[in-house]
Image (cartoon, helix red, strand yellow):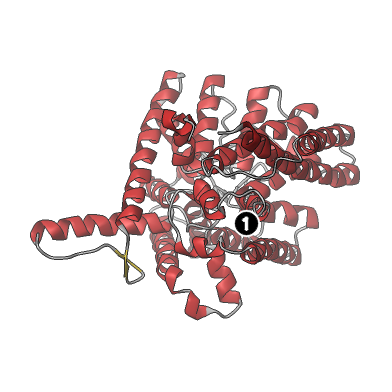
Amino acid sequence: MRSSEVKALLRFVGLLLMAEGGLMLLCLIPSLHFHDHTHWQILASGLFTAAVGALLVVRYHRHTAIADNRLAFLLVVVIWIVLALFGTLPLLSTGSVLNFTDAYFEAMSGFTSTGASVVAEVNRLPSSILLWRSMSQWFGGFGIILVVLALMPRMGINKYSLYTASASIEDPTSQQLSDSNMSFRRMVSIYLLLTALFIWMFHSSGLQMWDAVNITLTNISSGGFSIYDDGIASLSHHQQYLVALAMLFGGINFTMIYLFITFRWNKMEGKREQVMVYLLMFAASVAFCLLALRYHSGYGWSDAMRLAVVQSASAISTTGTQAVDASTWWTPIAFLFLLLAVCGGMAGSTSGGLKTMRVIILVRNVRTILRNQLHPHAVNPVRLNGHPVARSVINNVMVIFFVSVAVAFIGVMLLMLCGEGGKDAIGAMMGCITGYGPRFGYSGALATYGSFAMSSKWVCIAAMLMGRLEYITVIVLLYPPFWHRR
């Protein structure tokens, strides 16, 4: 890698830091409106972040081209690490958290849209910090990659290689989108449209604009941070259903949403099967939870349906928003939510997990292998949407699945070595690598990570980053040949 390309990368990071500083300065609005006495700290944090970004842009303004596509992987990892680093400034300067580890944990959880938190009583946080946590999830959920892709034209990096650096799988629809800047403008428009739509819907349902904005930002991004200590339990039943709808939309491929609202239904065939499987898993989970809550836990039909819908949407979209402490429910329900979080939403959405397309390919690959055992001479290709799946894509999926299992096992072992109990170690690691956030296990879904040891929190930080960037993007940087000159 040439020094000029590294300088171009730093210039690019500088542009994103300027954007991050601008988002910080927006937090002055609630600070001044609610008089939380944090405006000077927020102002200093925003100006410093923007100034560092501007310095990088000015210093390396002549370096705009990158010929080595390997830098796409390095760029994606650096973006999340650096944005989370500067994202600690508002948290530390306002005293919302007391040490750098907790601040970096909270910031990384925000920008990876994980939703894991070390803050026990969010009601006591300043309004500026509540908005900052929400905006970090909204920006990290899908905004970062869209901004990066929109700014790529003059840098020479193939935009699809950058997209796959954060998606780690070949996605024909996403590749079509990467072919034109206009397509990414449409994606940004869809994200903004959904955000504005749900803010209006929440506000129309009776919520104050402040609550509507924060709830929308954290749920449309599959983030899950809450501005209430009880999750969304204090919201009305109607509002909880709206939260579930926002979470479901966050887990759907944005291309599909665009094609649907523009009546281009004939072009949806490439994703239709994934949407059907995504919605079928959600419906099956709602049905199982409804019956289990009604007949095993004694809930009334109305409450059982509401909680089944909200918690199932939270799990399959890996949002982690809680309307109730679901860890106290029947154990098979908690295990079902774990499976949903592992599967996750669709590729090209804000959700985490393996993604629906990978799950379909994994299952059908197993079926094909079994058929080949029975009929060795038959041709049984793995099909998706009626078309054979390339062997390279199947191999990619198998590698991602194997690496995710390995990372989970290693992460659990590291947490136990750091002193965490076995059940909490498993629950925390699964919550971090899937992007679900809340801890599975006996500590409770509303429990925070504040009681974890410092070393455990850093393990979780690494897990959140790897889960968000889908493992390969981070691991490839540890592969020695990656750094060899070409």
Number of numbered labels in the structure image: 1
Local SS, label 1: helix
Does residue 65 lie above or below 60 as drawn? below
Residue at position x 56%, y 73% in the image = 259
Please tell me which residue lies in front, 360 or 283. 360
Residue at position x 42%, y 65% in the image = 274
Quadrant containing the N terminus in the rendered view: top right
Q: Is residue 254 left or right of residue 404?
A: right
Residue at position x 19%, y 64% in the image = 380
Does residue 231 lie above or below 244 as drawn? above
Does residue 186 lie above or below 163 as drawn? below
The image quarter in which residue 38 lies: top right
Q: Is residue 479 left or right of residue 99?
A: left
Crowd band around label 1 with a 10 angstrom C-alpha radius: few (<14), some (14–19), many (20+): many
Q: Position of residue 212 (x, y in %)?
A: 73, 57
The image quarter in which residue 130 lies: top right
- The residue at which mark 1 appears reads as 220
Q: Is residue 485 left or right of residue 357?
A: right
Judge whether residue 227 can be spotted in this image.
no
Q: Position of residue 173 (x, y in %)?
A: 49, 65
Please tell me which residue lies in front, 485 or 326. 485
Q: Position of residue 209 (x, y in %)?
A: 79, 57
Residue, far front? 486
Please tell me which residue lies in front, 235 or 453. 453
User: Of the residues shown, which amino acid type is indicated by label 1?
Assistant: Ile
Q: Position of residue 256 (x, y in %)?
A: 53, 69
Please tell me which residue lies in front, 398 or 481. 481
Judge whether residue 50 can be spotted in this image.
yes
